[in-house]
Image: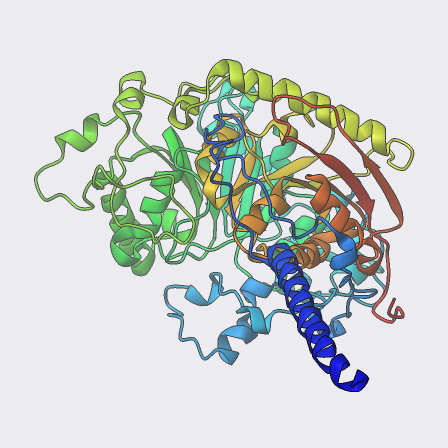
Amino acid sequence: MKQKSEKPYTAKQITSALIAFIFLLGVLCLYYGSSFAPALSRSDGEHDGSDPVLGGNIRDFDDLFEDQEHNPEVPKSIPICDIKHSELIPCLDRNLIYQLKLKPNLTLMEHYERHCPPPERRFNCLIPPPIGYKIPIRWPESRDEVWKANIPHTHLAQEKSDQNWMVVNGEKINFPGGGTHFHDGANKYIVSLARMLKFPNDKLHNGGNIRNVLDVGCGVASFGAYLLSHSIIAMSIAPNDVHENQIQFALERGIPSTLGVLGTKRLPYPSRSFELAHCSRCRIDWLQRDGILLLELDRLLRPGGYFAYSSPEAYALDPENRRIWNAMHDLLRRMCWRVAVKKDQTVIWQKPLGNGCYLKRGPGTQPPLCSTGDDPDATWNVHMKACIIPYSAKMHKERGSGLVPWPKRLTAAPPRLEDIGVSPEQFHEDTNIWQFRVNEYWKQMKSVVRKNYFRNVMDMNSNLGGFGAALKDTDVWVMNVAPVNMSSRLKVIYDRGLIGTVHDWCEAFSTYPRTYDLLHAWGVFSEIQEHGCGVEDLLIEMDRILRPDGFVIIRDKPLIINYIRKFVTALRWDRWLSEVEPRSDALYLSEERVLIARKKLWSEGASAM
């Protein structure tokens, strides 16, 4: 009887235990499911406004990084890529074009445009430096010499030996300052351009009114290098073409430059950004596709801007060059450009100040005016258009950009602030905040940073350019990067006399490995997480473009900083570390931490960590 009376009791126990277990399992699934769910923006209305200075909505993250005990998957090491990839540019890798069986139009230079690998084909490994790599020579000495081991390519020295591009000299490569059309040096050539235009005191900056220059097909960027001493900054661009590594040489020298091509898509710069465009034997067919490439220059030039063209078409008397010259002259006349001056091997055209000439053209004149709905500042993956962008009514009335001369324009509120809904008061507040922030960064790094340590600097989320402006008294140049959703603000950066580009940080940047001495990332990781992109992918990309011994400054939410810090050793960014909680200000992201890390110099043969 005793045994019979115990059987129902045991069954009840088992049933109760099962119910309790299922309930506990449900709670655990709910907890962990919420922890690993995709990030969602808040919808409770707590932050329903758009900050006119910060831009965009202020958004919160999910609990992905909240409890590291439940997210322990942080690698103790990251694989090292094969040494053959030491110069890999993931989105400009022509091997990828062949592997994916893409069919770019070679005539239109599509093979030099961006083609990014799908996630399954990314190189999730650290790019090793070439054998014998040395810490780069510091500016200003680097303008004239670099270590040959860092860019072991000497083909250009042989091919351009009669033009003084570069000379191999033992362990170094020297740059005499020559170019295809300025064998006697870029400095003399710059003075000759100023004399042609009859600028005061033979200064090309024209009293600070010429500040931003676009140099297309720039070679090793000696023109841009020597413009710096004239208080002019050039965006020097060239494709990754048969002139092997020309932009890599430019960046190793510390000269503002980037990979780019006039192909089928707009260059990633806002309209009305440059006072002068320059082409010295740049091998560009300006007449193709109804003059679409000249029309792209027209989009980029400010009212009254100049195009300096040094090429055989400007002076040679043979029938073919005469044909090209006549066709270019006719096209530019219909675009309302005029010849400002022509002398020896160079012609300089000037763009009109207003819309008057456009309105006087006859019906059906080509190229046509663009439609009023076209956004001249939309550039990311936007195809060029064979039409003329007329000036706004305000710009036409003022007959100019309304900018004050350099250097006053760096801190003066530019007229186009109105386009992005930012007041002059907010602009000046932003400038002051970033001056304070940068001063605090230097205090944080003063024990390890020496004079002239930084030269090539990138601000990965440039906003209004306050970070770059705060470096005005240092001998650096800053690549101001506007994320795609903030691209409208890049025009303000150019109006301050700075340079920059548009980029999507879910993809690799168009530059060579080991390009920058300092990367500044304010809120960048928060932004990419909102778009479902990986923190680890961006960290590996930052490592690719960061020079050995270089620094990263990451300013973001504490949860993200805590997560990133766990990768520091695997990335070999642990030569020096510092982390602080900054003072709150008007740009403060509710909670912020600042992590500064320094990258080690390591070789391809280094053991895995």
Can you say whether 262 is above or below 88 in the image?
Answer: above
Q: Residue furthest front?
A: 1
Residue 386 locus on image (x, y percent) = 26, 50
As drawn, the residue found furthest toward the top would be 425
Residue extending farthest left: 363
Q: Quadrant of residue 465?
A: top right
Q: Which sits in the foreground, 201 or 485?
A: 485
- One can see residue 139 in this view: no
If the image is split into quadrants, where does the C terminus sit?
A: bottom right
Q: Is residue 118 above or below residue 489?
A: below
Coloring applied to the structure: rainbow
Judging depth in this view, the residue of 512 and 345 nearest the camera is 512
Residue occupying image coordinates x 29% and y 59%? 319
574 left or right, relative to 174 = right
**x and y percentages locating residue 201 in the rendered image:** 56, 19
Quarter occupied by the N terminus: bottom right
| Position above or below: 222 against 124 | above
Is residue 468 depicted above or below 608 in this figure? above
Nearer to the camera, 220 or 79: 79
Residue 54 x/y as whole percent: 54, 30
State whether residue 195 appears in this view. Answer: yes
- Residue 592 horizontal/vertical position (percent): 70, 34
How many numbered marks, from 0 up?
A: 0
Left or right of 164? Residue 56 is left
Q: Residue at x 34, y 39 (%)?
A: 376
Task: Tell me the quarter of the picture where residue 390 sits.
Answer: top left
